[in-house]
Amino acid sequence: MGNEDLVNEVLSLKRERNAVILAHNYMDYDIQVVADFIGDSYDLALRAMETKAEVIVFAGVRFMAEQAKALNYDRTVLAPDPGAGCTIADALNADMLRRAREEYPNAPVVLYVNSNADVKALADYIVTSSTAIKVVKKLSSDVVIFGPDSNLADYVAHMTGKRIIKVPPNGKCIVHASYTVDMVREARAKYPGAKVMIHPEAPLNVLRMADFVGSTNQMIEYARDSGYDEFVVGTEIGMLNALRIKVPNKTFHPLTTGPSAKCPFMAMVTLDKVYRSLRDMVHKVEIPKSTADAIREAFERTRKLLEG
Ligand code: SF4
């Protein structure tokens, strides 16, 4: 089937199945154009709660689809490729977290959304890259267990001055952890008028060189509202699709086009797999209800802390 036929088939199946497609900012362009919502993983799970669709197709990696299921437990959530993992989420298991709790019994556990469902269910607070600093600052404890991303943990420690116990000590994103100071220097030399935006999953020495550090959604806001016209984008290369769709009148360059620019797990999710999952209603995400309840409670606790 040609790409145009595939797009039309997906659009028609969406209507037939009363489905919505949620696409992460890193997805390929042809998936983003058939999506009902494009955003980061938490934002998308919340958007799903606003729709009446019976079926949610989550075009992203597995922990994101699990999260959408936890927050929309009565709906059918499809993960077009359930084998698509994440090096951050897969770095932490429940036993490692339990051991950290035993060692630091008075420290709250703050987990990044990039965690698998069984681990996320053990968190006291669940944060995104845009809320991590605010949440840790608001906690009364000066010692905080934080995971699974080690670079985000370093950034949070740097910005809050608190003692951060990393679980595990070395969870890393295969894309962002590969960024180097030289990449930023080269991009600044090549695009001297551009502002450099970098995701906080990158190493701290690289973040120190950025004009703006933020989540994918914060990058979209910065690009749209900052008054600058040209940007170097320090996150997964699919983000350029989202920026070009959402901020069409500005110019974006990738920080790198090298081998680490594209996440191999995100690349596993293709339009063809989105089509097949909807056509055959396969790859339904199943998590225990108790896990979903615990995740929702941790999100609710986090929301209250942020609003308090
Ligand atoms: S880009 Fe990094 S954080 Fe995102 S899914 Fe890939 S490995 Fe995980």
Image: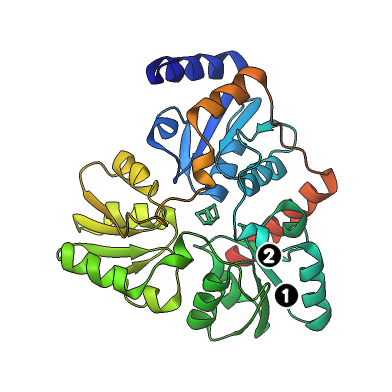
In this rendering, position of residue 88 left or right of residue 234: right
Q: Is residue 165 above or below residue 39?
A: below
Q: Are marks 1 and 2 in contact (CB under 8 Å)?
A: yes
User: How many C-alpha atoms fall within 10 Å of the one at disc 1: few (<14), some, or many (≥20)?
Assistant: many
Name the residue located 49 percent from the left edge and 42 percent from the top edge: 267
Return the residue nearer the eye: 234 or 292.
234
The residue type indicated by label 1 comes to: Pro
| Residue 94 location, quadrant | bottom right
* CA separation in Å, label 1 and label 2: 8 Å
Q: Secondary structure at mark 1?
A: loop
Q: Position of residue 150 (x, y in %)?
A: 57, 72
Q: Position of residue 162 (x, y in %)?
A: 59, 85
The residue type indicated by label 2 comes to: Tyr
Q: Is residue 211 visible?
A: no
Name the residue located 55 percent from the left edge and 68 percent from the top edge: 132
| Residue 164 location, quadrant | bottom right
| Residue 143 location, quadrant | bottom right
Which residue is tagged 1?
108
Q: Residue furthest front?
A: 259
Name the residue located 50 percent from the left edge and 48 percent from the top edge: 264
Q: Is residue 209 above or below residue 255?
A: below
Q: Is residue 87 visible?
A: yes
User: How many C-alpha atoms fall within 10 Å of the one at disc 2: few (<14), some, or many (≥20)?
Assistant: many
Which residue is tagged 2?
125
Q: Earlier in the sequence, mark 1 or mark 2?
A: 1
Name the residue located 20 percent from the left edge and 56 percent from the top edge: 230
